[in-house]
Image: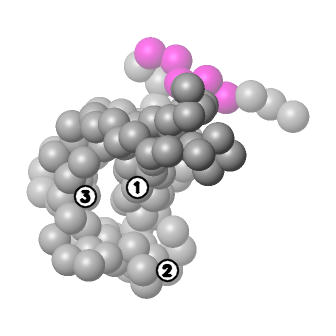
Amino acid sequence: MTIQSLAEGSPPDTRELRALELYRTRGHEIRKVGEDLYLVPSRTGQGSYTVDYNEESCSCPDYRTRKETCKHIYCVGISLAKRRRRVCACVEGWVYVGYLDDNDVERVASYRCRRCG
């Protein structure tokens, strides 16, 4: 088994790694434009592509040619996973949940612990 690293200056060589690199460099530009529709910037910065995450389809040439998951679809998946709520441990009967709101602002909500409350 080989382990790949993203060395400075070397291009990633799988769609998953290219998606991760795209998210790291341009993920903040992903825009939700419909219920499951997202505009994802191109890697080069020349335009963007429409991803239907529910249908797992994209308007990019790679997807149109291969009909398989492209880096833009993976990039939306990474973005959505990053927005999932993160639960912290119970602190004196309270559980604190950290999450990103629609404006990428980190928020914290508090709830009574089910075990302690």
Q: Which residue is mark 3?
A: 40
Residue 78 visible in image: no
Residue at 64% over, 41% down: 116
Q: Residues within 10 Å of mark 2 (few under 14, many from 20)?
A: few
Q: Position of residue 14 (x, y in %)?
A: 57, 47
Q: Is residue 1 left or right of residue 40?
A: right
The magenta region covers: 4-8
Q: Nearer the viewer, mark 2 or mark 3?
A: 3
Q: Is residue 91 magenta?
A: no
Q: Looking at the picture, which amino acid does disc 2 mark? A: Lys
Looking at the picture, tell me which residue is in the foreground, 94 or 89. 94
- Residue at screen point 74% across, 28% down: 3
In terms of secondary structure, where does tag 1 sit?
A: helix
Residue sitting at 31 percent across and 76 percent down? 36
Point out which mark residue 67 bears.
2
Is the residue marked by circle 1 packed among few (<14), some (14-19), or many (20+) residues within 10 Å? few
Q: Are marks 2 and 3 in contact (CB under 8 Å)?
A: no
Label 2: which secondary element: loop
Q: Amino acid at mark 3?
A: Val
- The answer for how far apart the CA atoms under marks 2 and 1 are is 22 Å
User: Residue at 12% across / 57% down in the picture?
Assistant: 47
Q: CA distance from mark 1 to mark 3?
A: 13 Å
Give the mark nearer the N terminus: 1 vs 3: 3
Which residue, given by chain and number where applicable, does mark 1 sit on? 80
Residue 94 left/right relative to 101 = right
Compared across the picture, whether 83 is left or right of 39 comes to right
